[in-house]
Amino acid sequence: MDMPPPNRTVDDTSSHGARNRRTARRFRGVRLCGVALIVLVLLLGGGSVAPLQATAAEECFPQTGKCVGDPFYQYWLANGGLRQQGYPITNAFDEVSPTNGLLYRVQYFERARFEYHPEFTGSPNEVLLGLLGREQFTARYPQGRPEGGTGEVCFDVTKRCVSGVFHRYWQQNGGLRQQGYPTSDEFDEVSPTNGLTYRVQYFERARFELDPENADPAYQVLIGLLGREQFLSRYPQGEFATFRPIADARVDGSDPDRNFGAENYLAADGDPVRASYLRFDVRGLGSNVASARLRVYCPPDILGSASPDGGIVARVSDTSWAEDRITYRNRPPINGQPLATLGAVQPGQWYEFDVTAAVTGNGLVNLGLRSENYNAARYSSREEYGHSPYLIVTFAR
């Protein structure tokens, strides 16, 4: 969908209120932000992602106060724009995928979740849509629904069929790549948006909704607001932001002069002494911090990842350490009061430390991870993109 210049309007189908009025509402076009800071925060039931400063490559939407940058913005433009994806309801942030447990940069829109896949950089799969249809259908109908009967196209993969106006819409709006396989047949469902009953069909990435009374045939099939529903379900706690480390490294008493800053794992061990250091650049916080959690991943492919003691996290007051130069011999002390401790850890799991006391606002946050147990705990470092440590900072409402 081509974006209008700022003084023009386009049809807005992001609200189901259009069904009641039988006319599409209109909105003012998006504006190019340049380096302006968006201060309007959309409070979706009390939950949103922290507003970030826009750059010249971003488009910002005054309707929600959120900005979209590349590569998400180019994908949005090329794949249906407002009608298919809806407005952005968050800025980009890091999220562990419910599909495969990996950490991705994502952004929620009213109807979709965009996921950035750096392993596919430069290919059509660099941005993929999350499987919101599958996730929401499974959550709402854990027992499933009866397998269907006939349709114009049936898929052995899911044993479901698509027919009529849903089939035509599927064909004309991205098909398998954009909508995914059908995960249900048609059935009647009470809309979580307005409480009315519609004929719907779930696909891996979408929910089709039929409104045959709409006077405009182009809007008789609408995409459900799965992005909004999923975001509110996963993040009811309030406004938040995520941060990956800008530096991390481990040090090892058995090899005291070696730098491990480029290695793919961190460690906390009492004998030999191994400790880890993490630095975060926290910025863009616009409210008081309610909580801060450090999330780390215990990898399954490193010998000895399992440990009865996941370690202790504390502040590091000496901030002069550098990722590419720190060694056991020149390491700064992890001398702050313990912020949090972790019990037994097992490979293949994410774990959290409560580090709220260390994150009071914008600025650099330096943390140390140590253990007095001889059985080392090991965690993925920032070099492991899909399992990188990260901070989740939640703001007071």
Image (cartoon, rainbow, N blue to C red):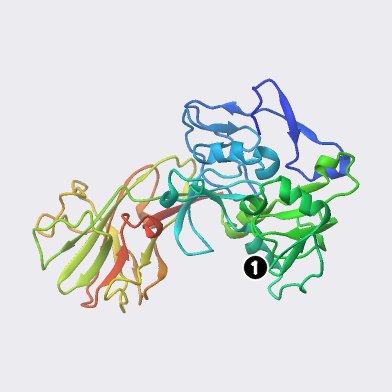
**Which residue is label 1 attached to?**
157
How many numbered markers are drawn? 1
Q: Secondary structure at mark 1?
A: loop
Rendered location of residue 356, percent (x, y): 40, 56
Point out residue 136 in the picture as x, y percentages from the top left corner.
Answer: 66, 62
Give the x, y percent position of residue 163: 80, 58
Q: Residue at x 37, y 65 (%)?
A: 297
Image side of residue 33 versus residue 253, left or right: right
Point 46% across, 30% down: residue: 55
**Above or below, comparing residue 107 to residue 78 in the picture:** below
Q: Residue at x 30, y 75 (%)?
A: 309
Left or right position of 254 against 246: left
In this picture, is 249 found above or below 343? above
Residue 68, above or below 246: above
Residue 272, picture quadrant: bottom left
- The picture places residue 164, in percent across and down from the top left corner, at 83, 54
Q: Amino acid at mark 1?
A: Val
